[in-house]
Image (cartoon, rainbow, N blue to C red):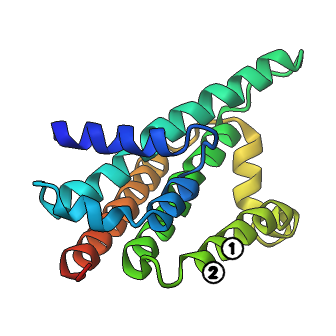
């Protein structure tokens, strides 16, 4: 676990100017870092775990930046915690889809995957209005501000963590069987 700290630090050193996980993965692919990392005296599961653990600093940085932007905006409205948490929770889910592809494709097709994910992120924000028409109950729940069902929230949190864990297991299985 202590080695994972240094692997996370490596990702942050790679992206001194950029704060996106895809940039760290792209730089890993461009510099062929997977070959180097596999030669280190670390099991492959720690390499995969470090990529997933590096999600947490990104989430914390995005939360702090969002709160700073909100607080400097001089808004009289209270912070919309549900909307904020849903937006910030979206990043690990997108990374949960991205990282298995990163470990599977390596250098071969990551430029195409990066372009597709950037388009997904950009078009995802513009598609929110059409999603509001298709799922009005979800958007009413987000805007209502009431915590009416704690059980539903707990089930959603467990499902969220389960999806991330499944993504980790898929990435681990791909990377341990991969010949680099």
Q: Cα distance, mark 1 to mark 2?
A: 5 Å
Looking at the image, which is closer to me, 168 or 129? 168
Q: Give SS at disc 1.
A: helix
Q: Residue 139: x, y in percent? A: 76, 54
Query: Pointers 1 and 2 in contact (CB under 8 A)?
Result: yes
Looking at the image, which is closer to me, 115 or 143? 115
Looking at the image, which is closer to me, 81 or 27? 27
- Number of dots carrying numbers: 2
Looking at the image, which is closer to me, 156 or 8? 8
Give the residue number, with chain letter if any, for mark 1.
115
Mark linked to residue 61: none
Q: Quadrant of residue 123?
A: bottom right
Relative to 18, residue 80 above or below: above
Q: Residue 160: x, y in percent? A: 43, 57
Relative to 175, residue 52 above or below: above
Task: Give the crowd class for mark 2: few <14, some 14-19, many >=20 residues within 10 Å.
Answer: few
Residue at the location (16% across, 56% down)? Answer: 40
Relative to 65, residue 53 above or below: below
Q: Quadrant of residue 17?
A: top right
Q: Is residue 124 left or right of residue 180?
A: right
Q: Give SS at disc 2.
A: helix
Q: Residue 146: x, y in percent? A: 66, 36
Image quadrant for the C terminus?
Answer: bottom left
Task: Give the crowd class for mark 1: few <14, some 14-19, many >=20 residues within 10 Å.
Answer: few
Residue at the location (38% across, 60% down)? Answer: 164
Q: Residue 76: x, y in percent? A: 89, 16
Residue at the location (24% across, 43% down)? Answer: 4
Residue at the location (43% across, 46% down)? Answer: 11
Q: Quadrant of residue 79?
A: top right
Mark linked to residue 112: 2
């Amino acid at each position: 676990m202590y080695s994972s700290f240094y692997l996370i630090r490596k990702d942050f050193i790679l992206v001194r100017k950029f704060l996106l996980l895809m940039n760290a993965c792209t730089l890993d692919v461009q510099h062929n870092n997977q070959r180097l990392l596999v030669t280190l005296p670390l099991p492959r599961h720690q390499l995969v775990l470090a990529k997933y653990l590096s999600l947490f600093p990104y989430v914390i940085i995005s939360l702090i930046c969002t709160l700073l932007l909100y607080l400097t905006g001089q808004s009289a409205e209270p912070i919309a915690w549900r909307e904020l948490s849903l937006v910030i929770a979206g990043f690990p889910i997108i990374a949960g889809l991205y990282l298995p592809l990163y470990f599977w494709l390596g250098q071969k097709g990551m430029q195409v995957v990066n372009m597709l994910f950037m388009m997904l992120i950009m078009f995802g924000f513009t598609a929110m209005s059409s999603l509001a028409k298709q799922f009005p109950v979800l958007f009413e729940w987000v805007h209502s501000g009431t915590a009416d069902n704690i059980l539903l929230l707990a089930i959603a949190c467990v499902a969220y963590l389960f999806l991330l864990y499944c993504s980790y297991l898929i990435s681990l299985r791909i990377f341990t069987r991969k010949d680099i």
